[in-house]
Each structure stands twice: as C-alpha cells, then as structure tokens.
Image (cartoon, rainbow, N blue to C red):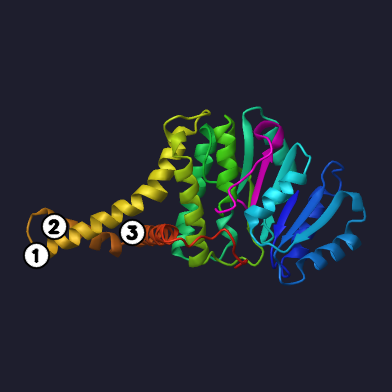
Amino acid sequence: ILLPMRNEEKNVIRKLESVISEIFEEDNANLLVIDSGSTDNTADIASGFLSDEFEQESRWEVVSWPEPGKSRAINRAVAKIESEIIVMTDADAYVSPGWLEIITQRLSEKEIGVVSGLEDENFSENDRFNSYYRKKSNWLRIKESEFGSTPVLEGSIIAWDTGKIGKIQIDEGVNADDAQIGMISIRKGFRSIIDRRVSFHDFEMKKRGFGESVRRSQGLSIVLLKNADLAFFPKGRGSRLPIINAISLYVVFPWASLIFSINSIFAFYNAPEISLNWPFFSILSIIAVATIPSGRVLLTGVIISLISHFQAIFGKRYNVWNPIR
C-alpha cells in the first residue's frame, strides 16, 4: 500500500487510521509512506503514529527525501517495492471500507491490469460545475469499464498488478500519474477499469477548486496526446472508443469551441444583420448555450481545458504542487 505525501500534517493521521483498519489483519499487506519535499512534519507524524498504532514494524516504512513531485515519488517507491499488487491512495482521500478485497478480486481477473475507484459526489461540497461533471463522468467511466477500459482513472485510489504490467516508470514531467498508469496497462493489452464499489471522498468534504481542475485537465490532456496512437492501433479489448472519446472531449472540443466562437464573432461583426444567415444563428447559439445552466457548465469546462492547454504550450506545468484540499 503506497501513500505519497507532501505537507499533509492535517491528513496524515486520519489517512493512516483508515488504511491500517483495512490492512491490519491482512498479513501480506505492507505499508510504504513516501514523503517527498515536505516542509512540515508529515514524516515525523507518520512515523510516530505508526510506531504507536501498528506494532508490526516489519510491515511498514516511512521514507523521505527533499525533492518534491508525486510522479518522482511514485517512481522511486515502485523501484524498491517487490509486490504482486500495488495500491496507491492519496492522503486527502477517505476510501470506503472493503476496498482491498474488491481490488484484489478484480485484479485476479486475467484481463484486468489496473483498478481505480470513483469519487462519491454525495459527500463533496460541489458547485454546479463539479456536481454536473462528476455525475456525468462517473456514469461514463463505469460504462466504459463494463465494456472494456477507461482512460480516465482516479489517483485517489488506484491499484495495479505488477505481474501483468511490470515495473512501471511514469513521466515525471506530467502530473497525471493515474492516467499514465492506466495507459501503461492498456498499451500492454490489459484493461484499466473503474469499480463503482470502491468510492472515496475528501476528508473535509470540500469542493474541487478551479486551480485543481486546471491542473488535472492539463495532465490528462498531455497523457491522452502522448498515447493518441492507441486510438488508431488499440492494444486491448474495448479501449479504442473510450480513448477517441476522451481525446475528442478533453483536447479537440475546447479548441473547436474557441475557433467556432471567434469565427462567429468576426462573421457577425462584419455582417451584423438579424436575419436568417449563418453569422446571426452562430451568435444566437452561443448566447443560448451561455444562458442555460448545463450550457454554462459546458463553457466552464471549455475554459478550464483551454487555460490548461495554453499553460502547457507556454511551459507552465503542474508536475510539482502543494496539496490544496
């Protein structure tokens, strides 16, 4: 059980409590806390708590180093872990009980290389955008997983079978470790799935902020583009259409919307006539979308994606970040 942490003083004890309660009676489950670049007392708190509450010291370890970055931490941790199954979970996520048994059972299926959970929107303080997006996204990921693979996973709880996908090495310049791990599995011909029975929510039940959405959008978009060949040359069952859909939704659609909007504005500016012509109907459609609630949600998603893409183009990356929630 791998727990990457950075500046997690407020979460470390409650996270360890929930994990220990899950693995305590599983003798073959060990715990590795990776503290990377913390400027607080995360590592000391973790070591002290585990010494008091998890007396089997051979089953846990806390490792620290000064360099920040979750992807870097994952690579270093995985290099030293000799285990058939690795489960990684974020410090700010409370995962519903029973996750270890479910994950182990799903990974015993020969076609499945990666299993992830989903965020339970009922436990989060969501605005309209996050609530709408989460419900639609969860439904889509579940359906994709039932028929094959989904390229959009959740790093808050994700597990993989090293016997199937091998020792992973993820790109440390991209923050979307969950999507990277899922793509490794798909590329090797195994399924990457969401299991609805493994759900999680933020300990403090706070909504996802705008900056966090931008960070996640950028990482996912980069990973999708790096693996775009799988849309044309799929390696496993049921992976092609989900990858095409994800690239269309997260990469192509925001730019198509921007181009359409700019073109419509210029066209109507050059011919400002309220009549049955293309410029007028284009402007009218933009106004209509911005008026209805679901349309505003759509526009918010487009803006988030475009900001993340522009930042990536101009060199701003989110491979190193401080916890927000």
The magenta stretch is 155-174
Please report whichever mark, 3 or 2, sits nearer to the chain's N-terminal start.
2
Contact? badges 3 and 2 (CB < 8 Å): no
Q: Amino acid at mark 1?
A: Pro
Residue bearing the label numbered 2: 279
Contact? badges 3 and 1 (CB < 8 Å): no
Q: Quick check: 150 left or right of 280?
A: right
Q: Amino acid at mark 3?
A: Gly
Question: Looking at this view, is 13 or 197 the one in front?
Answer: 13
Residue bearing the label numbered 1: 272
Name the outermost residue toward the bottom.
40
Q: Residue at x 92, y 56 (%)?
A: 55
Instruction: From the image, state whether disc 3 or disc 2 is nearer to you.
Output: 2
Determine whether the residue tagged by mark 3 lies in a helix, strand or loop: helix
Q: Where is the C terminus found, in terms of image quarters? A: bottom right
**Picture coordinates of residue 68 (x, y %)?**
66, 62
Please report whichever mark, 3 or 1, sits nearer to the chain's N-terminal start.
1
Residue bearing the label numbered 3: 295
